[in-house]
Amino acid sequence: MRQSGSGRNGARGGRAGSRQGFRSRDDKPVRQSETTKQRAPNKPASAKARPASPPRVKPPTDAPRQPTRAQAKAAAQETLATGVQTLVVEPDEADMRIDRFLVARFPQLAFTHIQRIVRKGELRVDGKRAKPNERLVAGQKVRVPPLKLDQPRPVARSSAKDQDDRDFLKSITLYEDKDVLVINKPMGLAVQGGSGTTRHVDGLLEALRDDEGQKPRLVHRLDKDTAGCLVIAKTRFAASTLAKSFRSRTTRKIYWALVAGVPRVRQGRISTYLAKEEGGEGDSRMKVARHGDEGASHALTYYATVDTAAHKLAWLSLKPVTGRTHQLRAHAAHIGHPIVGDPKYFDIENWELPGGIQNKLHLLARRIVIAHPRTGKPIDITAPLPPHMQQSFNLLGFDTSRYDPIVDAPEA
C-alpha cells in the first residue's frame, strides 16, 4: 500500500517538480534569453494583441461555484424523474429496507406513493424484482422507474412551525446524543401518518432535518394510544445499527399495564400465533391463530403481576420477546385480562370502569435498554407514567418504586 501511495505522490511530485523546475537556477538564464527575444517584438504589437486577451476580463473569483451536496442531490432527483435510473446503495444505507431507502433518497415523495411502487414490483435490485421487506446491502444497484415528482408536494414549512415542533420534541426528550434520540411519546400521538392523521412523530421530525436534507429516522413503532419510550436514529449509521438490535431481539423492553381482573398465575409466559383479522380496515385488529394459518406469526410475551386492587384490577409488567402488531394488547385479552381502556381488545361484558379511572388505554412503554450504535454500551431509559395512568395509580395506591419482578424474566 505504501508503494502505490508513494507512486501517486510521486506523480503529483513530478508535476510539482516540473513547475518548480521552471524556477530553478539552472533554467533561469534560458528563460531570460527566451523572454528577451519575445519581449522585443511583442512590445510594439501590444496594441494589436489587446483584442486577443478576453480571459483577463473575468477574475477567477467570478468562476461558477461547485454545487453543494444538497444541490447536487436535488439535481439528481429531478433527473431521476425523467426516466429509469440506477442508484447505488452507499455504506451508510446498508441494511435499510427498500421503502426506507427510497424515502431517504426522495423525501419529497409521499410514503404511500413509494409503497405503491414497491408493491407493484417496479423496483429491481441487482436485476431482480425487489420484495417489499427486502433489506439492502452496500454496493447493490437499485433500478428505479420514473418517479412522479410533479405530484402535489407538501406545503412549505414555516420557520415558526419548525421551531414549535423542535420545542415540543425537546420537551418530551428523555435522552439525546449525536446518534440517538429517545422521546416520551404522549398517548394519542401517532408515530406515522395515515388516513386522517396529520400530526405524528414522523412529521414532527421534519423540523430536525440537517443541512444535507436528512431527518432522524424511526427504528420501531408504538401504537397511537401507547405512551412511553420511542427510540429514534439521528443518522443512517445509527438507524442501521439500532434496527439490527431490534430484529436480533437484543433490545430489552418493559411495558406497564393496568388490566381488568387479577391473573390466577401471577407470573407467566404467553406464547401464541397472531394474525390480522379478515376484513379489517384501517387500523386492523389481531387475532390468535394457529401455526400454519395464513399470515400467522409467533408472538411471545412474559408477564408479572406487580400489584393488585381488590381483585378487580392488576398492575402488570410485560416483557415482549417478539414485536408483533398489538402483541401485548392481544395477549392480555387472550389470558382473560384485557388492558383497561382498550377500545379494540377489551371484551368483558358488563364490566364497569371504577370511579376516577379514565377510559383511556392504560399501557406504557416504561423502559428500554439498547446498545448504543457507536459505543456498544447500553442506553437505559425509563419513561414516567402518562397523566391518566398516574391518576389511576394514585387512586389505587400503587407505588411506582415497588420492585418489578419482570426484570427476572427470561430474555427469549
Image (cartoon, helix red, strand yellow):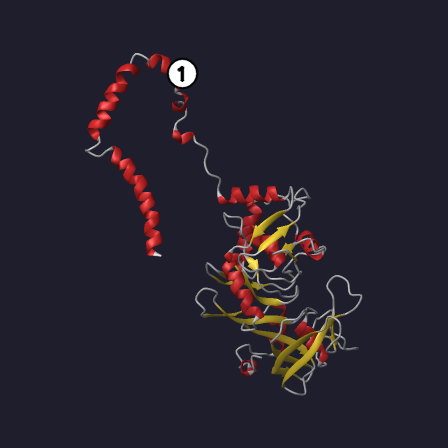
Residue 243: horizontal and vertical position, in percent? Answer: 56, 65
Image side of residue 291 versus residue 232, left or right: right
Image side of residue 330 versus residue 26, left or right: right
Image side of residue 158 versus residue 25, left or right: right
Report the residue that reaches farthest toward the bottom.
264
Q: What element carries label 1?
A: helix
251 or 97, which lies in front? 97
Q: Which amino acid does label 1 sit on?
A: Pro
Disc 1: which residue? 51
Residue 383: horizontal and vertical position, in percent? Answer: 54, 69
The structure residue drawn at horizontal position 40% and vertical position 18%, both measured from the top left corner, is: 52
**In which quadrant of the rendered view does residue 323 lie?**
bottom right
The structure residue drawn at horizontal position 46% and vertical position 58%, both measured from the top left corner, is: 178
Against 247, is 309 above or below? below
399 or 362, which lies in front? 362
**In which quadrant of the rendered view does residue 279 lie?**
bottom right
Residue 336: horizontal and vertical position, in percent? Answer: 72, 81
Q: Is residue 264 visible?
A: yes
Image side of residue 212 versus residue 14, left or right: right
